[in-house]
Image (cartoon, rainbow, N blue to C red):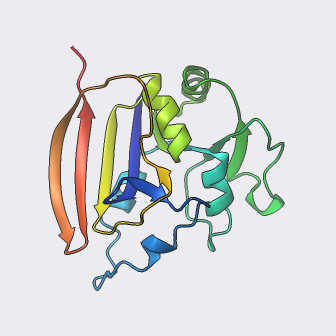
């Protein structure tokens, strides 16, 4: 099983504004309407685990952006909205428990999304690869991509690509000795 992060962050390291707002991402010029590899990435994924705050944001997207099952990590949500039944479900537990339970359900390649969720999976040493697109914009404050993880992890650079004058995509793979 491999666990992946695919995310964008501002130049100052934030993935969203303090209230979870993503409007700073919407205004990035994209003359070619490119998805910058996201569809190819999703093709190799079996499921997506995201935190409740991320789910609260993406559940408002129309149409629903995911063709793969979404597992919402939450202690407070009891059910998903009716229009997302079958597309998303609530799970809870520690990252190791989540990975084990999803592996038993044949979810072999997991996309991990959301600041706190990514941080908890990193702290548990459960992230194998990260694709981080840095947007050349400083938003000043917000939800940090990494925050204080308190665990050192070594990654190797697999590749770096300038996507357009506003974005650089960095691909990292976990290095374990």
Q: Is residue 6 left or right of residue 114?
A: left
In the rendered image, the residue lying farthest to the top is 177
The residue located at (49%, 41%) in the rendering is: 112
The answer to which of 150 and 22 lies nearer the viewer is 150
**Image position, residue 160 (x, y; %):** 16, 53
**Image position, residue 32 (x, y; %):** 28, 83
Relative vertical location of residue 70 with respect to residue 154 in this rendering, above or below: below
Using the rendered view, name the quadrant where residue 164 is placed.
bottom left
The answer to which of 177 and 12 lies nearer the viewer is 12
The answer to which of 152 and 31 lies nearer the viewer is 152
Using the rendered view, name the quadrant where residue 78 is placed.
top right
The residue located at (47%, 43%) in the rendering is: 111
The residue located at (43%, 55%) in the rendering is: 14
Q: Is residue 110 left or right of residue 102?
A: left
**Image position, residue 15 (x, y; %):** 45, 56
Q: Is residue 161 left or right of residue 1?
A: left
The residue located at (53%, 34%) in the rendering is: 107
Using the rendered view, name the quadrant where residue 100 is placed.
top right
**Image position, residue 72 (x, y; %):** 66, 43
């Amino acid at each position: 099983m491999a666990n992946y992060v695919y995310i964008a962050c501002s130049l100052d390291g934030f993935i969203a504004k303090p209230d979870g707002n993503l409007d700073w991402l919407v205004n990035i010029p994209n003359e070619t309407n490119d998805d910058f590899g996201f569809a190819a990435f999703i093709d190799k994924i079996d499921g997506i685990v995201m935190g409740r705050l991320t789910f609260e944001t993406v559940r408002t997207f129309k149409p629903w952006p995911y063709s793969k099952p979404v597992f919402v990590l939450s202690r407070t949500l009891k059910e998903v909205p009716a229009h997302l039944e079958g597309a998303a479900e609530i799970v809870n537990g520690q990252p190791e428990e989540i990975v084990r339970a999803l592996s038993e359900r044949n979810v072999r390649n997991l996309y991990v999304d959301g600041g706190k969720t990514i941080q908890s999976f990193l702290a548990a040493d459960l992230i194998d690869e990260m694709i981080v697109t840095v947007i050349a914009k400083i938003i000043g404050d917000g939800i940090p991509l990494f925050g204080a993880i308190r665990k050192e992890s070594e990654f190797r650079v697999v590749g770096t690509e300038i996507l357009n004058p506003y974005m650089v995509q960095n691909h990292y793979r976990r290095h374990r000795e």
